[in-house]
Protein backbone atom coordinates (compact mmCIF):
# COMPACT_ATOMS: atom_id res chain seq x y z
CA UNK A 1 0.00 0.00 0.00
CA UNK A 2 1.46 3.34 -1.05
CA UNK A 3 0.83 6.73 0.49
CA UNK A 4 -1.77 7.76 -2.11
CA UNK A 5 -3.91 4.69 -1.37
CA UNK A 6 -3.70 5.30 2.38
CA UNK A 7 -4.69 8.94 1.96
CA UNK A 8 -7.62 7.94 -0.27
CA UNK A 9 -8.88 5.41 2.27
CA UNK A 10 -8.56 7.81 5.20
CA UNK A 11 -10.20 10.62 3.22
CA UNK A 12 -13.05 8.39 2.06
CA UNK A 13 -13.77 7.23 5.61
CA UNK A 14 -13.60 10.81 6.85
CA UNK A 15 -16.02 12.06 4.17
CA UNK A 16 -18.46 9.25 4.90
CA UNK A 17 -18.46 9.88 8.66
CA UNK A 18 -18.78 13.65 8.13
CA UNK A 19 -21.72 13.08 5.82
CA UNK A 20 -23.40 10.74 8.31
CA UNK A 21 -22.94 13.31 11.06
CA UNK A 22 -24.39 16.14 8.93
CA UNK A 23 -27.33 14.05 7.74
CA UNK A 24 -28.18 12.58 11.16
CA UNK A 25 -27.97 15.91 13.00
CA UNK A 26 -29.86 17.69 10.24
CA UNK A 27 -32.72 15.18 10.27
CA UNK A 28 -32.95 15.30 14.07
CA UNK A 29 -33.08 19.10 14.18
CA UNK A 30 -35.51 19.31 11.26
CA UNK A 31 -37.88 16.89 12.93
CA UNK A 32 -37.76 18.77 16.23
CA UNK A 33 -39.87 16.95 18.84
CA UNK A 34 -41.64 14.77 16.26
CA UNK A 35 -39.20 11.87 16.53
CA UNK A 36 -39.25 12.08 20.31
CA UNK A 37 -43.05 12.09 20.40
CA UNK A 38 -43.26 9.11 18.05
CA UNK A 39 -40.89 7.16 20.28
CA UNK A 40 -42.93 7.96 23.38
CA UNK A 41 -46.40 7.42 21.90
CA UNK A 42 -45.98 4.60 19.39
CA UNK A 43 -45.20 1.90 21.92
CA UNK A 44 -48.70 0.75 22.89
CA UNK A 45 -47.80 -2.76 21.69
CA UNK A 46 -44.54 -4.53 20.99
CA UNK A 47 -45.25 -4.59 17.27
CA UNK A 48 -45.86 -0.82 17.32
CA UNK A 49 -42.63 -0.36 19.23
CA UNK A 50 -40.69 -2.37 16.66
CA UNK A 51 -42.25 -0.43 13.78
CA UNK A 52 -41.61 2.95 15.40
CA UNK A 53 -38.02 1.98 16.23
CA UNK A 54 -37.40 0.92 12.62
CA UNK A 55 -39.06 4.06 11.24
CA UNK A 56 -37.22 6.50 13.51
CA UNK A 57 -33.86 4.84 12.82
CA UNK A 58 -34.53 4.97 9.09
CA UNK A 59 -35.39 8.65 9.31
CA UNK A 60 -32.48 9.56 11.58
CA UNK A 61 -30.05 7.16 9.86
CA UNK A 62 -28.49 6.37 13.23
CA UNK A 63 -29.38 3.40 15.42
CA UNK A 64 -26.91 4.73 18.00
CA UNK A 65 -28.80 8.05 18.26
CA UNK A 66 -32.10 6.20 18.72
CA UNK A 67 -30.61 3.87 21.32
CA UNK A 68 -29.15 6.75 23.31
CA UNK A 69 -32.46 8.67 23.10
CA UNK A 70 -34.45 5.66 24.32
CA UNK A 71 -31.96 5.08 27.14
CA UNK A 72 -32.47 8.72 28.14
CA UNK A 73 -36.27 8.29 28.17
CA UNK A 74 -36.01 5.15 30.31
CA UNK A 75 -33.52 6.74 32.69
CA UNK A 76 -35.83 9.75 33.11
CA UNK A 77 -38.85 7.53 33.73
CA UNK A 78 -40.63 8.73 30.55
CA UNK A 79 -40.80 5.24 29.05
CA UNK A 80 -41.16 1.79 30.58
CA UNK A 81 -38.35 -0.69 30.15
CA UNK A 82 -40.54 -3.23 28.32
CA UNK A 83 -41.63 -0.64 25.77
CA UNK A 84 -38.06 0.43 25.13
CA UNK A 85 -36.91 -3.14 24.36
CA UNK A 86 -39.25 -3.35 21.37
CA UNK A 87 -37.85 -0.05 20.03
CA UNK A 88 -34.33 -1.49 20.26
CA UNK A 89 -35.51 -4.45 18.17
CA UNK A 90 -36.89 -2.09 15.55
CA UNK A 91 -33.83 0.14 15.51
CA UNK A 92 -31.68 -2.82 14.45
CA UNK A 93 -33.92 -3.36 11.44
CA UNK A 94 -33.94 0.36 10.66
CA UNK A 95 -30.14 0.49 10.78
CA UNK A 96 -29.97 -1.75 7.70
CA UNK A 97 -31.23 1.07 5.46
CA UNK A 98 -27.73 2.57 5.40
CA UNK A 99 -26.45 -0.50 3.57
CA UNK A 100 -29.30 -0.23 1.07
CA UNK A 101 -28.55 3.45 0.41
CA UNK A 102 -24.92 2.60 -0.22
CA UNK A 103 -25.64 -0.40 -2.46
CA UNK A 104 -28.53 1.09 -4.45
CA UNK A 105 -27.13 4.60 -4.94
CA UNK A 106 -23.44 4.58 -4.10
CA UNK A 107 -22.52 1.95 -6.69
CA UNK A 108 -25.10 2.71 -9.38
CA UNK A 109 -25.21 6.49 -9.78
CA UNK A 110 -22.45 8.75 -11.08
CA UNK A 111 -21.42 10.52 -7.90
CA UNK A 112 -20.50 13.84 -9.51
CA UNK A 113 -23.91 14.13 -11.19
CA UNK A 114 -25.76 13.29 -7.99
CA UNK A 115 -23.78 14.14 -4.87
CA UNK A 116 -22.12 17.43 -5.76
CA UNK A 117 -25.35 19.26 -6.73
CA UNK A 118 -26.97 17.91 -3.55
CA UNK A 119 -24.15 19.33 -1.43
CA UNK A 120 -24.40 22.69 -3.16
CA UNK A 121 -28.18 22.82 -2.82
CA UNK A 122 -28.05 21.88 0.85
CA UNK A 123 -25.51 24.58 1.68
CA UNK A 124 -27.52 27.13 -0.33
CA UNK A 125 -30.58 26.39 1.81
CA UNK A 126 -28.42 26.78 4.93
CA UNK A 127 -27.14 30.20 3.76
CA UNK A 128 -30.57 31.53 2.73
CA UNK A 129 -32.39 30.72 5.97
CA UNK A 130 -29.81 29.74 8.63
CA UNK A 131 -32.14 29.93 11.66
CA UNK A 132 -35.03 27.73 10.46
CA UNK A 133 -35.72 24.03 10.16
CA UNK A 134 -35.04 24.38 6.44
CA UNK A 135 -31.39 24.97 7.33
CA UNK A 136 -31.33 21.63 9.14
CA UNK A 137 -32.83 19.97 6.07
CA UNK A 138 -30.12 21.64 4.02
CA UNK A 139 -27.50 20.11 6.32
CA UNK A 140 -29.15 16.71 5.90
CA UNK A 141 -29.15 17.03 2.10
CA UNK A 142 -25.51 18.16 2.05
CA UNK A 143 -24.59 15.32 4.40
CA UNK A 144 -26.33 12.86 2.10
CA UNK A 145 -24.18 14.10 -0.77
CA UNK A 146 -20.97 14.03 1.27
CA UNK A 147 -21.65 10.38 2.19
CA UNK A 148 -21.51 9.38 -1.46
CA UNK A 149 -18.45 11.49 -2.16
CA UNK A 150 -16.80 9.46 0.58
CA UNK A 151 -18.03 6.20 -1.01
CA UNK A 152 -16.60 7.26 -4.38
CA UNK A 153 -13.22 7.95 -2.79
CA UNK A 154 -13.35 4.62 -0.96
CA UNK A 155 -14.11 2.79 -4.21
CA UNK A 156 -11.05 4.20 -5.91
CA UNK A 157 -8.90 3.53 -2.84
CA UNK A 158 -10.02 -0.08 -2.50
CA UNK A 159 -9.67 -0.66 -6.22
CA UNK A 160 -6.00 0.20 -6.01
CA UNK A 161 -5.58 -1.74 -2.79
CA UNK A 162 -7.22 -4.84 -4.25
CA UNK A 163 -4.57 -5.03 -6.96
CA UNK A 164 -1.77 -5.13 -4.40
CA UNK A 165 -3.10 -6.90 -1.28
CA UNK A 166 -5.33 -9.90 -0.77
CA UNK A 167 -6.75 -9.22 2.70
CA UNK A 168 -8.72 -12.47 2.79
CA UNK A 169 -5.50 -14.50 2.51
CA UNK A 170 -4.31 -13.15 5.88
CA UNK A 171 -7.28 -14.71 7.65
CA UNK A 172 -6.87 -18.14 6.13
CA UNK A 173 -10.13 -19.93 5.44
CA UNK A 174 -13.10 -21.66 6.97
CA UNK A 175 -14.86 -20.75 10.21
CA UNK A 176 -11.71 -19.19 11.68
CA UNK A 177 -11.65 -16.60 8.90
CA UNK A 178 -15.29 -15.76 9.55
CA UNK A 179 -14.59 -15.18 13.25
CA UNK A 180 -11.63 -12.94 12.37
CA UNK A 181 -13.79 -10.82 10.07
CA UNK A 182 -16.52 -10.60 12.72
CA UNK A 183 -13.89 -9.21 15.10
CA UNK A 184 -12.67 -6.81 12.40
CA UNK A 185 -16.20 -5.44 11.81
CA UNK A 186 -16.77 -5.11 15.54
CA UNK A 187 -13.49 -3.26 16.05
CA UNK A 188 -14.13 -0.83 13.17
CA UNK A 189 -17.56 0.10 14.56
CA UNK A 190 -16.22 0.55 18.10
CA UNK A 191 -13.40 2.79 16.89
CA UNK A 192 -15.51 4.91 14.53
CA UNK A 193 -18.74 4.73 16.62
CA UNK A 194 -20.64 4.31 13.36
CA UNK A 195 -21.86 0.99 12.01
CA UNK A 196 -22.86 2.84 8.82
CA UNK A 197 -19.25 3.83 8.14
CA UNK A 198 -18.05 0.27 8.86
CA UNK A 199 -20.65 -1.26 6.55
CA UNK A 200 -19.85 1.23 3.78
CA UNK A 201 -16.19 0.19 3.98
CA UNK A 202 -17.13 -3.51 3.98
CA UNK A 203 -19.45 -3.14 0.99
CA UNK A 204 -16.85 -1.15 -0.93
CA UNK A 205 -14.19 -3.77 -0.19
CA UNK A 206 -16.55 -6.54 -1.35
CA UNK A 207 -17.47 -4.73 -4.56
CA UNK A 208 -13.76 -4.21 -5.23
CA UNK A 209 -13.23 -8.00 -4.78
CA UNK A 210 -10.86 -7.30 -1.91
CA UNK A 211 -12.69 -9.78 0.37
CA UNK A 212 -15.03 -12.69 -0.46
CA UNK A 213 -18.78 -12.42 0.12
CA UNK A 214 -18.84 -14.75 3.14
CA UNK A 215 -16.03 -12.86 4.87
CA UNK A 216 -17.73 -9.54 4.14
CA UNK A 217 -20.98 -10.90 5.59
CA UNK A 218 -19.12 -11.93 8.73
CA UNK A 219 -17.67 -8.42 9.02
CA UNK A 220 -21.20 -6.99 8.74
CA UNK A 221 -22.26 -9.21 11.63
CA UNK A 222 -19.37 -7.80 13.67
CA UNK A 223 -20.33 -4.23 12.74
CA UNK A 224 -23.92 -4.96 13.80
CA UNK A 225 -22.74 -6.20 17.20
CA UNK A 226 -20.38 -3.21 17.48
CA UNK A 227 -23.32 -0.79 17.60
CA UNK A 228 -23.89 -1.91 21.20
CA UNK A 229 -20.71 -0.12 22.28
CA UNK A 230 -22.47 3.25 22.04
CA UNK A 231 -25.33 2.05 24.24
CA UNK A 232 -22.91 0.61 26.80
CA UNK A 233 -20.99 3.89 26.98
CA UNK A 234 -24.24 5.86 27.25
CA UNK A 235 -25.41 4.08 30.42
CA UNK A 236 -22.31 4.77 32.49
CA UNK A 237 -23.63 6.47 35.63
CA UNK A 238 -27.27 5.94 34.59
CA UNK A 239 -30.09 4.25 36.46
CA UNK A 240 -30.73 0.49 36.58
CA UNK A 241 -33.41 0.48 33.85
CA UNK A 242 -31.04 2.24 31.46
CA UNK A 243 -28.38 -0.41 32.16
CA UNK A 244 -30.95 -3.14 31.62
CA UNK A 245 -31.89 -1.62 28.27
CA UNK A 246 -28.26 -1.57 27.19
CA UNK A 247 -28.12 -5.20 28.33
CA UNK A 248 -31.14 -5.99 26.13
CA UNK A 249 -29.39 -4.31 23.20
CA UNK A 250 -26.23 -6.35 23.76
CA UNK A 251 -28.14 -9.63 24.20
CA UNK A 252 -30.23 -9.05 21.07
CA UNK A 253 -27.23 -8.23 18.91
CA UNK A 254 -25.10 -11.06 20.30
CA UNK A 255 -27.79 -13.70 19.82
CA UNK A 256 -28.69 -12.37 16.37
CA UNK A 257 -25.04 -12.25 15.37
CA UNK A 258 -24.31 -15.75 16.68
CA UNK A 259 -27.27 -17.26 14.82
CA UNK A 260 -26.35 -15.38 11.62
CA UNK A 261 -22.75 -16.60 11.88
CA UNK A 262 -23.81 -20.22 12.38
CA UNK A 263 -26.10 -20.24 9.34
CA UNK A 264 -24.04 -17.78 7.28
CA UNK A 265 -23.09 -20.04 4.32
CA UNK A 266 -26.61 -21.41 4.07
CA UNK A 267 -28.18 -17.93 4.35
CA UNK A 268 -25.87 -16.44 1.72
CA UNK A 269 -26.67 -19.35 -0.60
CA UNK A 270 -30.41 -18.92 -0.04
CA UNK A 271 -30.28 -15.15 -0.63
CA UNK A 272 -28.17 -15.64 -3.77
CA UNK A 273 -30.79 -18.06 -5.13
CA UNK A 274 -33.50 -15.63 -4.08
CA UNK A 275 -31.90 -12.90 -6.21
CA UNK A 276 -31.62 -15.24 -9.18
CA UNK A 277 -35.21 -16.47 -8.87
CA UNK A 278 -36.64 -12.94 -8.87
CA UNK A 279 -34.25 -11.71 -11.53
CA UNK A 280 -32.51 -9.22 -9.27
CA UNK A 281 -29.07 -7.90 -10.13
CA UNK A 282 -26.55 -10.25 -8.54
CA UNK A 283 -24.08 -7.71 -7.08
CA UNK A 284 -22.06 -8.14 -3.86
CA UNK A 285 -23.42 -4.90 -2.39
CA UNK A 286 -27.07 -5.85 -2.93
CA UNK A 287 -26.53 -9.38 -1.63
CA UNK A 288 -24.80 -8.10 1.53
CA UNK A 289 -27.51 -5.48 2.12
CA UNK A 290 -30.15 -8.19 1.80
CA UNK A 291 -28.13 -10.34 4.21
CA UNK A 292 -27.90 -7.48 6.74
CA UNK A 293 -31.66 -6.92 6.69
CA UNK A 294 -32.56 -10.61 6.70
CA UNK A 295 -30.54 -11.62 9.74
CA UNK A 296 -31.83 -8.66 11.75
CA UNK A 297 -35.43 -9.52 10.86
CA UNK A 298 -34.72 -13.15 11.76
CA UNK A 299 -33.28 -11.95 15.06
CA UNK A 300 -36.50 -10.07 15.88
CA UNK A 301 -38.58 -13.12 14.92
CA UNK A 302 -36.41 -15.30 17.13
CA UNK A 303 -36.41 -13.07 20.21
CA UNK A 304 -39.92 -11.61 19.96
CA UNK A 305 -41.63 -14.61 21.62
CA UNK A 306 -39.00 -14.55 24.38
CA UNK A 307 -39.23 -10.82 25.10
CA UNK A 308 -41.22 -11.33 28.32
CA UNK A 309 -38.58 -13.73 29.64
CA UNK A 310 -35.81 -11.35 28.59
CA UNK A 311 -37.47 -8.43 30.40
CA UNK A 312 -37.94 -10.48 33.58
CA UNK A 313 -34.35 -11.72 33.41
CA UNK A 314 -32.96 -8.20 33.07
CA UNK A 315 -35.30 -6.85 35.76
CA UNK A 316 -33.42 -9.09 38.16
CA UNK A 317 -30.11 -7.43 37.34
CA UNK A 318 -28.47 -4.14 38.42
CA UNK A 319 -30.64 -3.66 41.47
CA UNK A 320 -30.25 -0.49 43.54
CA UNK A 321 -31.01 0.09 47.23
CA UNK A 322 -34.23 1.94 46.51
CA UNK A 323 -35.44 -0.82 44.17
CA UNK A 324 -34.83 -3.48 46.81
CA UNK A 325 -36.51 -1.47 49.55
CA UNK A 326 -39.32 -0.38 47.22
CA UNK A 327 -40.48 -3.97 46.75
CA UNK A 328 -43.74 -4.46 48.71
CA UNK A 329 -43.38 -6.86 51.64
CA UNK A 330 -47.04 -7.58 52.30
CA UNK A 331 -48.97 -7.12 49.03
CA UNK A 332 -49.63 -10.59 47.69
CA UNK A 333 -51.84 -11.22 44.66
CA UNK A 334 -52.91 -14.56 46.12
CA UNK A 335 -54.94 -12.84 48.87
CA UNK A 336 -57.01 -10.77 46.42
CA UNK A 337 -59.73 -13.41 46.59
CA UNK A 338 -59.78 -13.03 50.37
CA UNK A 339 -60.82 -9.37 50.80
CA UNK A 340 -60.34 -9.15 54.58
CA UNK A 341 -56.77 -10.46 54.32
CA UNK A 342 -56.15 -8.16 51.34
CA UNK A 343 -57.09 -5.10 53.42
CA UNK A 344 -54.85 -6.40 56.22
CA UNK A 345 -51.99 -6.67 53.73
CA UNK A 346 -52.54 -3.09 52.57
CA UNK A 347 -52.61 -1.88 56.19
CA UNK A 348 -49.31 -3.63 56.94
CA UNK A 349 -47.68 -2.14 53.83
CA UNK A 350 -49.01 1.31 54.74
CA UNK A 351 -47.57 0.89 58.24
CA UNK A 352 -44.18 0.26 56.65
CA UNK A 353 -44.59 3.30 54.36
CA UNK A 354 -45.55 5.44 57.35
CA UNK A 355 -42.39 4.41 59.18
CA UNK A 356 -40.22 5.50 56.23
CA UNK A 357 -42.12 8.79 55.84
CA UNK A 358 -41.84 9.68 59.55
CA UNK A 359 -38.15 8.87 59.49
CA UNK A 360 -37.80 11.29 56.58
CA UNK A 361 -39.70 14.00 58.49
CA UNK A 362 -37.55 13.62 61.60
CA UNK A 363 -34.41 13.78 59.47
CA UNK A 364 -35.63 16.86 57.59
CA UNK A 365 -36.35 18.74 60.81
CA UNK A 366 -32.87 18.07 62.13
CA UNK A 367 -30.94 18.69 58.88
CA UNK A 368 -29.02 21.91 58.39
CA UNK A 369 -28.05 21.39 54.74
CA UNK A 370 -29.77 20.47 51.48
CA UNK A 371 -31.40 17.02 51.29
CA UNK A 372 -28.96 14.15 51.56
CA UNK A 373 -28.94 11.34 48.99
CA UNK A 374 -30.60 9.14 51.61
CA UNK A 375 -33.51 11.52 52.00
CA UNK A 376 -34.12 11.62 48.25
CA UNK A 377 -33.76 7.86 48.11
CA UNK A 378 -36.43 7.42 50.78
CA UNK A 379 -38.76 9.71 48.83
CA UNK A 380 -38.42 7.47 45.77
CA UNK A 381 -39.08 4.39 47.90
CA UNK A 382 -42.25 5.92 49.37
CA UNK A 383 -43.50 6.92 45.91
CA UNK A 384 -42.94 3.44 44.48
CA UNK A 385 -44.54 1.66 47.43
CA UNK A 386 -47.60 3.93 47.33
CA UNK A 387 -47.94 3.24 43.61
CA UNK A 388 -47.95 -0.48 44.36
CA UNK A 389 -50.61 0.04 47.06
CA UNK A 390 -52.76 1.96 44.58
CA UNK A 391 -52.40 -0.77 41.95
CA UNK A 392 -53.28 -3.42 44.55
CA UNK A 393 -56.36 -1.42 45.57
CA UNK A 394 -57.55 -1.20 41.96
CA UNK A 395 -57.17 -4.95 41.52
CA UNK A 396 -59.00 -5.57 44.78
CA UNK A 397 -61.90 -3.35 43.68
CA UNK A 398 -62.41 -5.55 40.63
CA UNK A 399 -63.30 -8.49 42.88
CA UNK A 400 -66.64 -9.07 44.57
CA UNK A 401 -66.07 -7.05 47.75
CA UNK A 402 -68.24 -7.22 50.89
CA UNK A 403 -69.63 -3.83 51.95
CA UNK A 404 -67.50 -3.76 55.10
CA UNK A 405 -64.31 -4.17 53.07
CA UNK A 406 -65.34 -1.73 50.35
CA UNK A 407 -65.80 0.94 53.02
CA UNK A 408 -62.14 0.72 54.06
CA UNK A 409 -60.52 1.02 50.63
CA UNK A 410 -60.93 4.83 50.39
CA UNK A 411 -59.29 5.13 53.81
CA UNK A 412 -56.33 3.06 52.60
CA UNK A 413 -55.82 5.48 49.73
CA UNK A 414 -56.33 8.43 52.08
CA UNK A 415 -53.55 7.14 54.35
CA UNK A 416 -51.29 6.67 51.33
CA UNK A 417 -51.95 10.30 50.40
CA UNK A 418 -51.04 11.54 53.88
CA UNK A 419 -47.75 9.65 53.88
CA UNK A 420 -46.94 10.86 50.37
CA UNK A 421 -47.44 14.42 51.65
CA UNK A 422 -45.12 13.74 54.59
CA UNK A 423 -42.38 12.57 52.21
CA UNK A 424 -42.84 15.53 49.86
CA UNK A 425 -42.94 18.13 52.65
CA UNK A 426 -39.84 16.60 54.23
CA UNK A 427 -37.86 17.36 51.08
CA UNK A 428 -39.32 20.88 50.96
CA UNK A 429 -38.32 21.54 54.57
CA UNK A 430 -34.77 20.34 54.01
CA UNK A 431 -34.48 22.50 50.87
CA UNK A 432 -35.77 25.56 52.72
CA UNK A 433 -33.30 25.06 55.55
CA UNK A 434 -30.40 24.72 53.15
CA UNK A 435 -30.79 28.23 51.76
CA UNK A 436 -29.74 30.24 54.76
CA UNK A 437 -29.38 30.20 58.52
CA UNK A 438 -32.97 30.46 59.78
CA UNK A 439 -32.87 30.44 63.58
CA UNK A 440 -33.35 33.92 65.15
CA UNK A 441 -30.49 35.52 67.07
CA UNK A 442 -32.72 36.36 70.04
CA UNK A 443 -32.03 33.59 72.56
CA UNK A 444 -35.56 33.37 73.94
CA UNK A 445 -37.10 33.30 70.48
CA UNK A 446 -34.54 30.73 69.38
CA UNK A 447 -35.53 28.51 72.31
CA UNK A 448 -39.19 28.85 71.34
CA UNK A 449 -38.43 27.73 67.78
CA UNK A 450 -36.33 24.77 68.97
CA UNK A 451 -39.07 23.72 71.39
CA UNK A 452 -41.59 23.75 68.54
CA UNK A 453 -39.30 21.54 66.49
CA UNK A 454 -38.90 19.15 69.44
CA UNK A 455 -42.67 19.03 69.96
CA UNK A 456 -43.14 18.16 66.29
CA UNK A 457 -40.59 15.35 66.58
CA UNK A 458 -42.48 14.06 69.63
CA UNK A 459 -45.73 14.11 67.61
CA UNK A 460 -44.06 12.21 64.77
CA UNK A 461 -42.87 9.60 67.25
CA UNK A 462 -46.33 9.21 68.78
CA UNK A 463 -47.99 9.01 65.34
CA UNK A 464 -47.04 5.38 64.94
CA UNK A 465 -50.16 3.28 65.24
CA UNK A 466 -48.07 0.08 65.40
CA UNK A 467 -46.82 1.06 68.89
CA UNK A 468 -48.34 -0.84 71.79
CA UNK A 469 -49.05 2.39 73.67
CA UNK A 470 -50.44 4.26 70.65
CA UNK A 471 -53.33 6.46 71.73
CA UNK A 472 -55.25 7.94 68.82
CA UNK A 473 -57.25 10.42 70.89
CA UNK A 474 -54.21 11.67 72.83
CA UNK A 475 -52.20 11.97 69.63
CA UNK A 476 -54.98 13.97 67.97
CA UNK A 477 -55.19 16.30 70.97
CA UNK A 478 -51.41 16.84 70.91
CA UNK A 479 -51.56 17.65 67.17
CA UNK A 480 -54.41 20.13 67.76
CA UNK A 481 -52.46 21.96 70.49
CA UNK A 482 -49.33 22.05 68.32
CA UNK A 483 -51.23 23.49 65.38
CA UNK A 484 -53.64 25.94 67.04
CA UNK A 485 -51.78 26.98 70.19
CA UNK A 486 -48.03 26.50 69.98
CA UNK A 487 -47.71 27.33 66.27
CA UNK A 488 -49.95 30.41 66.48
CA UNK A 489 -48.14 31.68 69.60
CA UNK A 490 -44.74 31.21 67.92
CA UNK A 491 -45.94 32.88 64.73
CA UNK A 492 -47.17 35.92 66.74
CA UNK A 493 -43.82 36.18 68.53
CA UNK A 494 -41.95 36.12 65.22
CA UNK A 495 -44.16 38.86 63.77
CA UNK A 496 -43.65 41.03 66.88
CA UNK A 497 -39.88 40.50 66.72
CA UNK A 498 -39.86 41.52 63.06
CA UNK A 499 -42.00 44.62 63.74
CA UNK A 500 -39.65 45.69 66.56
CA UNK A 501 -36.58 45.27 64.40
CA UNK A 502 -35.28 42.35 66.51
CA UNK A 503 -34.99 40.23 63.36
CA UNK A 504 -35.16 40.90 59.63
CA UNK A 505 -38.62 40.79 58.08
CA UNK A 506 -37.35 38.54 55.30
CA UNK A 507 -35.84 36.16 57.85
CA UNK A 508 -39.08 36.06 59.86
CA UNK A 509 -41.16 35.34 56.76
CA UNK A 510 -38.71 32.65 55.67
CA UNK A 511 -38.75 31.01 59.10
CA UNK A 512 -42.57 31.10 59.26
CA UNK A 513 -42.74 29.35 55.89
CA UNK A 514 -40.52 26.58 57.22
CA UNK A 515 -42.47 26.29 60.49
CA UNK A 516 -45.77 26.09 58.57
CA UNK A 517 -44.41 23.14 56.61
CA UNK A 518 -43.06 21.49 59.76
CA UNK A 519 -46.43 21.96 61.46
CA UNK A 520 -48.07 20.30 58.46
CA UNK A 521 -45.61 17.39 58.72
CA UNK A 522 -46.90 16.53 62.17
CA UNK A 523 -50.52 17.10 61.12
CA UNK A 524 -50.29 14.76 58.08
CA UNK A 525 -48.45 12.07 60.03
CA UNK A 526 -51.08 12.14 62.80
CA UNK A 527 -53.96 11.87 60.33
CA UNK A 528 -52.28 8.98 58.55
CA UNK A 529 -51.84 7.12 61.83
CA UNK A 530 -55.43 7.82 62.91
CA UNK A 531 -57.04 6.45 59.75
CA UNK A 532 -54.61 3.56 59.62
CA UNK A 533 -55.53 2.63 63.20
CA UNK A 534 -59.19 2.41 62.13
CA UNK A 535 -58.24 0.10 59.28
CA UNK A 536 -56.19 -2.08 61.64
CA UNK A 537 -59.16 -2.32 64.01
CA UNK A 538 -61.08 -3.85 61.13
CA UNK A 539 -58.28 -6.37 60.89
CA UNK A 540 -58.89 -7.49 64.45
CA UNK A 541 -62.66 -7.82 64.06
Image (cartoon, rainbow, N blue to C red):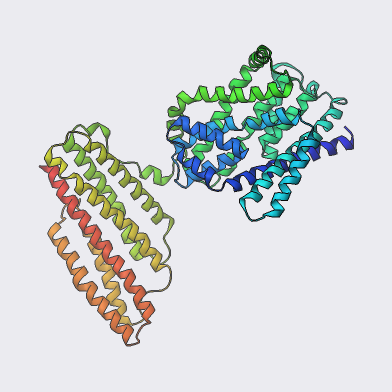
Q: Nearer the viewer, residue 406 or 24?
A: 24
Is residue 143 placed above or below 282 in the rendered structure?
A: below
**Image mark count:** 0
Is residue 451 placed above or below 7 in the rendered structure?
A: below
Using residue 478 as the reference point, say whether residue 235 is left or right of it: right
Using residue 347 as the reference point, say whether residue 302 is left or right of it: right
> Residue at coordinates 62% horizontally, 35% vertically from top-left?
227
Using residue 73 as the reference point, say whether residue 294 is left or right of it: right
> Residue at coordinates 24% horizontally, 58% vertically from top-left?
525
Q: Position of residue 104 (x, y in %)?
A: 71, 28
Q: Position of residue 302 (x, y in %)?
A: 51, 22
Please indicate, yes or no, whether residue 239 appears anywhere in the rendered image. Answer: no
Q: Name the residue furthest left.
A: 541
Which quadrant would the C terminus be assigned to in this image?
A: top left
Q: Name the residue furthest bottom.
A: 500
Which quadrant would the N terminus be assigned to in this image?
A: top right
Q: Position of residue 25 (x, y in %)?
A: 64, 46
Q: Position of residue 249 (x, y in %)?
A: 54, 33
> Residue at coordinates 35% horizontally, 87% vertically from top-left?
501
Using residue 335 as the reference point, say whether residue 3 is left or right of it: right
Occupied quadrant, residue 494: bottom left
Q: Nearer the viewer, residue 356 or 4?
A: 4
Q: Nearer the viewer, residue 497 or 8?
A: 8
Is residue 286 placed above or below 409 in the rendered structure?
A: above
> Residue at coordinates 25% horizontally, 31% vertically from top-left?
334
Please indicate, yes or no, whether residue 216 appears anywhere in the rendered image. Answer: yes
Amino acid sequence: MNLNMLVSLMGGIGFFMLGMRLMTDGLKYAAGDSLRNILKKSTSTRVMGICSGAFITTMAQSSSAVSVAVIGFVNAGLMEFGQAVSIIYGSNIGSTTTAWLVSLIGFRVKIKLFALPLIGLGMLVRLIDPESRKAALGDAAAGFGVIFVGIDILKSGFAGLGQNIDIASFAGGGFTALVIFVALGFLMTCLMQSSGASIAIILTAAVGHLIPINDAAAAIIGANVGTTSTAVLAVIGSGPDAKRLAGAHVIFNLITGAVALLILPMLIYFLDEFERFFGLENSPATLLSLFHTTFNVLGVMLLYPMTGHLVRFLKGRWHTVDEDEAVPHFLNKHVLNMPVMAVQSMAMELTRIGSIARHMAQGAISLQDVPTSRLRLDKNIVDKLILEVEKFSVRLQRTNLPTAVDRHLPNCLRVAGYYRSVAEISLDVANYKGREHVLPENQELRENVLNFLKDTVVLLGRSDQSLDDYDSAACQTYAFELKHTKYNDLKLKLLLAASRGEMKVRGAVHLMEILAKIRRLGEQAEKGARYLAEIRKFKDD
